[in-house]
Image (tube, grey):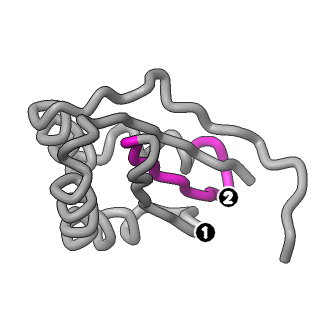
């Protein structure tokens, strides 16, 4: 099992705008991600105190986690967020899970 974490920061004064856009992005991303094999769970979130956004997903194999990098819908939205002022941390890391709570 692998945990994929993508994190970005945005201008603090635009938290409400970025949170709304992240929520709206689910309309496009949820069906696209559901078409990928191996996704066990996915979370998208923002934090006002740190002006950051995060996507955390859990995958059954490393290959399935890495498939996110080629998802056209995600690439298009990433470009949109960068144009709005998001700075994404790179590289995106896929962590091998060592244990979990049921």
Residue most toward the right? Answer: 99
> As rendered, which of 28 and 84 lies closer to the eye?
84
Give residue 76's quadrant in the image: top left
Q: Which mark is residue 40?
A: 1
Whole-percent x and y of residue 43?
49, 64
- The region drawn magenta spans 51-63
Q: Quadrant of the N terminus?
A: bottom right
- Say left or right for 7 vs 13: right
Residue most toward the bottom? Answer: 102
Q: Which mark is residue 60?
A: 2
Please tell me which residue is depicted at 48% across the width and 22% down the height of the picture: 91
> As rendered, which of 16 and 99 lies closer to the eye?
16
Please tell me which residue is depicted at 46% across the width and 52% down the height of the picture: 55
- Say left or right for 55 vs 13: right
Whole-percent x and y of residue 20?
20, 64
Q: Quadrant of the C terminus?
A: bottom right
Q: Nearer the N terminus, badge 2 or badge 1?
A: 1
Mark 2 neighbour class, 10 Å CA radius: few under 14, some 14 to 19, many 20 or more: some
Q: Is residue 23 above or below residue 51?
A: below
> As rendered, which of 32 and 88 lies closer to the eye?
88
Main SS type for the magenta part?
strand
**Magenta span includes 12:** no
> As rendered, which of 49 and 65 lies closer to the eye?
49
Determine the secondary structure under disc 2: loop
Please tell me which residue is depicted at 39% across the width and 52% down the height of the picture: 48
- Say left or right for 3 vs 100: left
**Magenta span includes 56:** yes
Determine the secondary structure under disc 1: strand
Please tell me which residue is depicted at 38% across the width and 36% down the height of the picture: 8
Mark 1 neighbour class, 10 Å CA radius: few under 14, some 14 to 19, many 20 or more: few
């Amino acid at each position: 099992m692998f945990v994929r974490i993508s994190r970005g920061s945005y201008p603090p004064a635009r938290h409400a705008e970025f949170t709304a856009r992240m929520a709206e992005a689910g309309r496009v991303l949820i069906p696209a991600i559901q078409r990928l094999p191996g996704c066990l769970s996915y979370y998208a979130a923002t934090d006002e105190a740190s002006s950051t956004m995060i996507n955390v997903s859990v995958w059954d194999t490393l290959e399935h986690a890495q498939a996110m990098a080629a998802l056209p819908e995600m690439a298009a939205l990433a470009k949109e967020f960068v144009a709005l002022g998001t700075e994404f941390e790179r590289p995106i890391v896929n962590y091998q899970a060592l244990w979990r709570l049921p």
